[in-house]
Amino acid sequence: MSEKYLIFGATGSIGSSLSKQLKDSGKEVHLVARNESEVKKLSDELSCSFTVADVLENGFIDKVKADAPDVKGIAYCVGSIVLKPLRMIKEDEFNQCMKLNCYSALEVIRGYQDTLKKSKGSVVLFSTVAVRRGFSNHGIIASAKAAVEGLTVSLASELAPNVRVNCIAPSLSKSKIAEPMLKNTALAEGIAKAHPLRRVGEGADSASLAKFLITDESSWVTGQVIGVDGG
């Protein structure tokens, strides 16, 4: 059975860091991202395979499975930052956020559940600290990520004992999707000071935990939602 690890959102700060950490530890990875030039550049750097796919498109999982049919673990490092007050929330953007963050993750797991069971594999999903902390203007994204946490504990029970499912809940970290917020120096400093550890997170912070959870190093850990949030 393959020891390949499948990384969705591979060109993001967490996905790329996780891919590099897995390769550095001798693991085989397959990258999935929607931007062809970015994912090809990373695949060339890591000497690994990749698939160009958009998780919002119908049938994306068939395209990925054609390139990587057997895997040991999956990290769904896909996310979004959608911040709007209640009065401005529209149903279509709420539905799109749910599809991007939760339903497409479910499709991935469903599509690979047989090979994951055979390999006694692992799945790592991503939530946000906003689910449990509660922040203004987070009605869309916090709801979608809360669904991811519910999916995590439900599937950890349903797929046990052969597949482990865990979730990481980061606070705001340096990334492409967070750049519009963090490019404001004063705002970035204020966000950093709001954390007991006095800094904004890095992709590597969450990736290090993801590497532990996706491999057999964490063979007795499942159904957990773990914060990586600077305290």
Image (tube, rainbow, N blue to C red):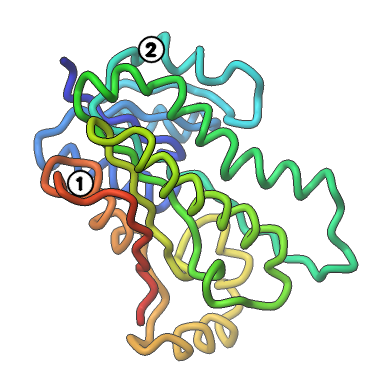
Task: Find residue 113 and report its horizontal and vertical position in percent.
Answer: 37, 23
- Residue 184 got which mark? none
Question: Foreground residue, 120 or 85?
Answer: 120
Decide: few, some or many residues near mark 2? Use Cα within 10 Å; few <14, some 14-19, many ≥20.
Answer: few
Q: Seen in the image, is 135 located left or right of residue 164?
A: right
Query: Of label 2 and label 1, which has the lower sequence position?
Result: 1
- Can you see residue 110? yes
Which corner quadrant holds the C terminus?
bottom left
Could you say whether the residue bearing mark 2 is in a helix, strand or loop?
Answer: helix
Question: Foreground residue, 58 or 201?
Answer: 58
In the displayed image of the protein, which residue is found farthest to the right? 87
- Can you see residue 46? no
Under mark 2, the amino acid is Asp
- From the image, tell me which residue sits under label 2: 67
- From the image, tell me which residue sits under label 1: 21
Question: Foreground residue, 196 or 103?
Answer: 103
Task: Find residue 12 and report its horizontal and vertical position in percent.
Answer: 45, 47
Residue at 41%, 49% (x, y): give it: 153
Could you say whether the residue bearing mark 1 is in a helix, strand or loop?
Answer: helix
Residue at 57%, 51% (x, y): give it: 147
Q: Seen in the image, is 227 located left or right of residue 101?
A: left
Under mark 1, the amino acid is Gln
Task: Find residue 134 and report its horizontal and vertical position in percent.
Answer: 60, 76
Q: Quadrant of residue 71?
A: top left
Task: Find residue 198 and report its horizontal and vertical position in percent.
Answer: 37, 87
